[in-house]
Amino acid sequence: MHQGFEIPVDKLQPTAILFEDLGLDSLDAVDMLVLLEEKMKIKVDTERLQKVRTLQDVYLLVTDLTSAAHLKN
């Protein structure tokens, strides 16, 4: 998040709200989706992404999807 979106490291807290605290917008959300899918080799459902509000939500979503992907293999 720090490098891809130029967010100061001190703002990267689990409870940081993506749009309000970190200043992300809808285009940033799409960029984040693409970045997550490429880096983590996962497919993020847009509906699930819309429920993500905080950095902790992002972490939990990625953890859930990567765990599910490992179970399939």
Image (cartoon, rainbow, N blue to C red):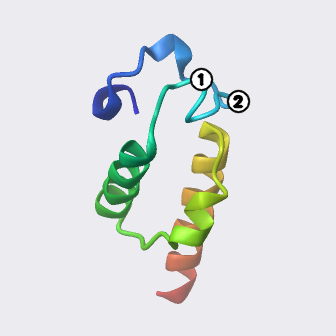
Left or right: 47 with respect to 7? right
Amino acid type of the residue tagged 2 in the rendering: Thr
Q: Residue at coordinates 54% horizontally, 23% vertically from top-left? A: 12
Crowd around label 1: few <14 · some 14–19 · many ≥20 (10 Å) = few
Q: Is residue 51 left or right of residue 73?
A: right
Report x, y in % for residue 6. Answer: 32, 23
- Secondary structure at numbered mark 2: loop
Establish if 55 lies above or below 48. Answer: above
If you read the primary sequence from the N terminus, does the residue marked by circle 1 or circle 2 appear first?
A: 2
Between the residue at mark 1 and the residue at mark 2, the CA separation in whole angstroms equals 9 Å
In the image, residue 63 above or below residue 66: above
Residue 66 point in image, percent of width and height: 52, 67
Residue holding disc 2: 15
**Relative image position of residue 52 (x, y in whole percent):** 63, 52
> Which quadrant would the N terminus be assigned to in this image?
top left
Q: Secondary structure at mark 1?
A: loop
Which of the 4 quarters of the picture holds residue 55?
top right
Within 10 Å of disc 2 (Cα), the crowding (few <14, some 14-19, many 20+) is few
Give the residue drawn at x 54%, y 58%: 62
Query: How many numbered circles does the render carry?
Result: 2
Task: State whether residue 70 is above or below residue 29.
Answer: below
Residue position for label 1: 21
